[in-house]
Image: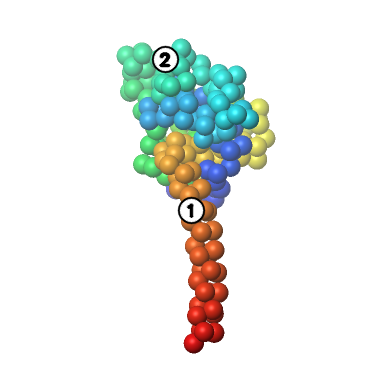
Amino acid sequence: MEIAAQSISIDINNKERLQRGAKLFMNYCSGCHSLKYMRYNRMAEDLGLTDFAGQINKNLLNNLIFTQATVSDPVQIALPPEDAKQWFGIIPPDLSLSARERGAHWLYLYLKNFYNDDSRPFGVNNLLVPNVTMPNVLEPLMGQQALVINNESHDSLLLTKQGEMLPVDFDNALQDLVTFLVYVGEPAKLIRYRLGIFVILFLTILLIAAYYLKKIYWRRL
């Protein structure tokens, strides 16, 4: 099935968006999906979960930890792999590199395009991944959708039951979640962006200094 193109906005420098995305992941995804390359303390520092002294605010971080893990542990799941395989047929994959492997736009479309299908084990299917084995964990927020087949153009989905969020708010929440996964896939981007700003400022100052130095040399000649 073809899906109509949809644009998204990803800004990993937006800490508020990263925090909201992290909260969504921990509340709706971390029960089955781990982030084995991301540690809680690294996430806390990058997402601004620190106090004025730069120390990790454990009260804030504890809102993201639902297992017996410590702040120095990677984000793992409490669900035993054997149970996961029995329930879902497969072991849910680690999502540390999902944004790098699939791309942000793919993740957004995947999460947005679940629809009701009584023939599937969990009662849902997906436009992007037909016969998907994953339940629609975001259904409480998104609501329920039905497939509308159009032989002349793209198939579409019709909202049949309103979720906790309005469609526009759910769309923003999805972009928060995808932004967080993009950050998790390459957290060093945050450092590169910050260094890039300083490098550009340094080169600008150096260029201005070189320009005036050149003028001084030419005056002496």
Give the class, few, some or many, for how many residues have Cα within 10 Å of label 1's Cα (few <14, many ≥20).
few
| CA gap, disc 1 and disc 2 | 39 Å
Residue 121 is at least partly visible in this image? no
Which residue is at a point 57% across and 33% down the rendered structure image? 48
- Which of the two labelled residues, at mark 1 and mark 2, occupies the earlier sequence position? 2
The x and y percentages for residue 209 are 53, 69
Location of mark 1 (residue) = 196
Element assignment for label 2: loop
Identify the image quadrant of residue 121: top left
Residue 180 is at least partly visible in this image? yes
In this view, 137 is above or below 47: above
Which residue is at a point 67% across and 35% down the rendered structure image? 166
Near-viewer residue (5 or 124): 5
Farthest residue toward the front?
220
Location of mark 2 (residue) = 78
The x and y percentages for residue 140 are 59, 25
Task: Determine contact: label 1, label 2, CB under 8 Å.
Answer: no
Element assignment for label 1: helix
Quadrant the N terminus occupies: top left
Near-viewer residue (7 or 99): 99
Amino acid type, residue under disc 1 in the picture: Gly
The x and y percentages for residue 143 are 60, 29
Give the class, few, some or many, for how many residues have Cα within 10 Å of label 2's Cα (few <14, many ≥20).
some
Q: Which-is-in-front pick, marks 1 and 2? A: 1
The x and y percentages for residue 43 are 49, 30
Amino acid type, residue under disc 2 in the picture: Ala
